[in-house]
Image (cartoon, rainbow, N blue to C red):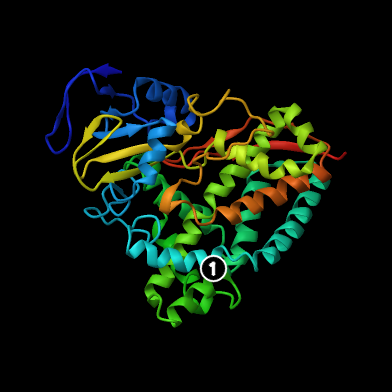
Amino acid sequence: MAQSTSSSPNGHDQEAPSVPTISMDPYSPEVLTEPYPFHHELREAGPVVWLEPYGVWATGRYEQVRAVLADWQTFISGAGTGLVDVRVDHWREPSLLLESDPPEHTAVREIMERILLPPDAFEAIRERFEAKAEALVGSLVSAGSFDAVTDFAEVFPVQAFGDEVGIPQEGRECLLAYADIVFNGQGPRNELFDAATQNAEEIQEWISYSCERENLAPEGLGAQIYEAADEGETTEEQAKMLVRSLLSAGLDTTVSALGSAVHLLATNPDQWEQLRADPSLARPVFEETIRLESPVQQFFRTAAHDTELAGVEIAEDERVMIFFGSANRDPRQWEDPERFDVTRKPSGHLAFGAGIHVCLGQVIARTEGEMLFAALARKVGSIELDGEPQRHLNNSVRRLASLPVRFHAP
């Protein structure tokens, strides 16, 4: 790290030594593999820093990350939530939910909130998730040794969530590949992006096919989105894009959380025993996991006008990189933040974001986690690592590629 005069992209100079500069690349394989030393440096450098490799502002402290997320009028999403400004570079159509601002964002979000957050109808989804969780965990206990990523963390969301959306069964292996493309696309056009997009045309064709009205189950969430189009609340094409948004945002992040949780429970046997003794801790296990190992590590916002953040002047159209994974481990906010504690009350964590763009699918993700970890507590005696975990590198999402484990019966 250095403290020096740094020129922002539009020519506005920031005077040293008030604004620290960080030269480390957050998208390097080393940082993506183990981001927490970088996050520590980022937080300790200052509330806002200049990230030299990409010419953007960055913050890893909880207070500033939350402030950016809360002020959507100043720090907009309509320019994209990744490194690239989607108003300039259209490698794909921007998300109607994630990469838009009011009033356009408000209109589509109201539709999705009505569909995804119906208190009177969600009990049926909980019951279906619980039955599927019991069946999956029971089969894995019988199997003994298996991969907690490919046989557990990936299987449940692809099947359970896929069924709720109502997409075709055949070809669902494309879901995770598509999410990998989308989240790698939030970063630079590096080797990870190139590798993810090798078969992009074939994958996107399946996604497009699966999001069309005639290919969706009539009672699923996807079909309900098209009903909004029938009522004139949105267009047919926008309805298709909203179904696509469900599929891109609702899977890879849940896979990340489920895999990380099994790893944390296996390597913290005292916490596992607390869950076994009290299955009602299943929901806190999920919350503590996504605080400690935040699935989405970083996103961007763009200044709508000249402004300041923590005393640092930010010019119109300059981008601010916000690190969820760092904010969720900020010792200014959390006591002993590096510790996995299933009795912690991590209310206020930013794993789902905050403000008007807070994750719409959080209720579904939380229910998936709660049902699965409650089933583990009831059916599994101990969790044993059965090999070395392998990490799947992605420009935005932190998750495992492989986690060999063994479930022992009680």
Q: Name the residue type under label 1.
A: Ile
Looking at the picture, how far across and down is residue 324, in whole percent? 45, 37
In the rendered structure, the answer to whether residue 152 lies left or right of residue 226 reads right
Q: Nearer the viewer, residue 329 or 217?
A: 329
Can you tell which quarter of the image residue 49 is in? Answer: top left
Looking at the picture, how far across and down is residue 310, in whole percent? 30, 30
Location of the N terminus (image quadrant):
top left
In the rendered structure, the answer to whether residue 108 lies left or right of residue 313 reads right
In the rendered structure, the answer to whether residue 367 lies left or right of residue 319 reads right
Location of the C terminus (image quadrant):
top right
* Crowd tier of the residue under label 1, counting other residues whose Cα lies within 10 Å: few below 14, some 14–19, many 20 or above: some
122 over 55 or under it: above or below: below
Can you tell which quarter of the image residue 159 is in? Answer: bottom right
Picture residue at 45% right of the left edge, 41% below the top: 394
In the rendered structure, the answer to whether residue 333 lies left or right of residue 92 reads right
Q: Is residue 206 visible?
A: no
Q: Is residue 88 visible?
A: yes
Looking at the picture, how far across and down is residue 20, in whole percent? 27, 22
Q: Which SS class for mark 1?
A: helix
Looking at the picture, how far across and down is residue 215, in whole percent? 53, 76
Q: Which residue does the numbered mark 1 point to in the structure image?
A: 115
311 over 306 or under it: above or below: above
